[in-house]
Amino acid sequence: MKAAGLSAHQILAPLVLAACGIAALTFLFNETVLAPTSAKLSAWQAVDYGEIPRDSDIRSNVWLLDGDDLIHAELVIGSGPSMILKNVRVNDRSNGGLSTVIQGKTARWIDNGWTLDDATTFSVASATTTPPSTVRFGLGVQPTSFTISSLDPDALGFSELRSAIADQRAAGRPTAGAEAAMWHKLSGPLASILMPLLGSIAGFGLARAGKTFTWSE
């Protein structure tokens, strides 16, 4: 192309235009295919590759700090008072140490708290486990707390992640890592535009330099 008389700008212009198209297609693919399938994969992994409940509002692997207690739910289904927590584990901590571990299959929001059915309680001090029973935990912990605690940048699109970051920031939670992931959703596709520009340095830079590898005393 150089021998035919084309300038560097004439050669690079269609390459940069094609790179812009590739960047746009990559961004759309991440938004419409990669993020939704990543969310489904995370939900599938949370149930050990079993059957996923048919619900459009599902979050997986949610952690929440309630005072000193640490609550973990493998699945959070729905929103508001009808929210259901699946495979729940409550680490009851006191004086900086773990005192009891409560585990159950299903928890529901009832009377300003969470009711965990068929829950077993393991006492660390006595190393004993109580028979399954109904246990109350998380008094005053609203269902919205589980909604804003769930944040997987790979499973959210750009606009969804931006909204989730705003919720996290309003709740006083750190958002630096999520913000970096959000901007990476833009910088990743745009990186393809740099490829023709970097290639132009190798294609035209050395030709202008002349005697680049010549040693003279």
Image (cartoon, rainbow, N blue to C red):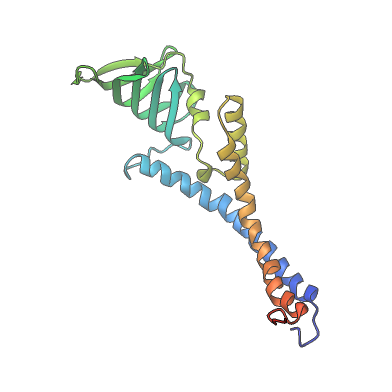
- Which quadrant is home to the C terminus? bottom right
Q: Is residue 18 visible in the rendered structure shown here?
A: no
| Identity of the residue furthest to the front in this view | 217
Is 134 displayed left or right of 155 in the figure? Answer: left
**Residue depicted at 45% across the width and 23% down the height:** 65
Task: Residue at 59%, 37% (x, y): give it.
Answer: 176
Question: Which corner quadrant holds the N terminus?
Answer: bottom right
Nearest the camera: 91 or 40?
91
Residue 197 or 87: which is nearer the viewer? 197
Q: Point out the residue furthest to the top here.
A: 111
Residue in front for this viewpoint, 79 or 1: 1
The answer to whether one can see residue 173 in this image is yes
Residue 93: x %, y % from top left: 35, 18
Label total for image? 0
Residue 188 versus residue 129 in the image, above or below: below
Q: Residue at x 81, y 85 (%)?
A: 5
Q: Is residue 33 above or below residue 128?
A: below
User: In x, y percent, where is residue 37?
Assistant: 47, 49
Please give left or right for residue 77 compared with residue 92 in the image. Answer: right
Quarter of the rendering containing residue 3: bottom right
Q: Indicate left or right for 200 with 78 as reference.
A: right
Quarter location, residue 18: bottom right
Q: Position of residue 158 (x, y in %)?
A: 61, 44
Residue extending farthest bottom: 3
Relative to 8, is 106 above or below? above
In the picture, measured across the screen, residue 100 lies left or right of residue 137, that is left
Q: Position of residue 46 (x, y in %)?
A: 37, 40
Residue 191 lies in quadrant: bottom right
Above or below: residue 90 compared with residue 42: above
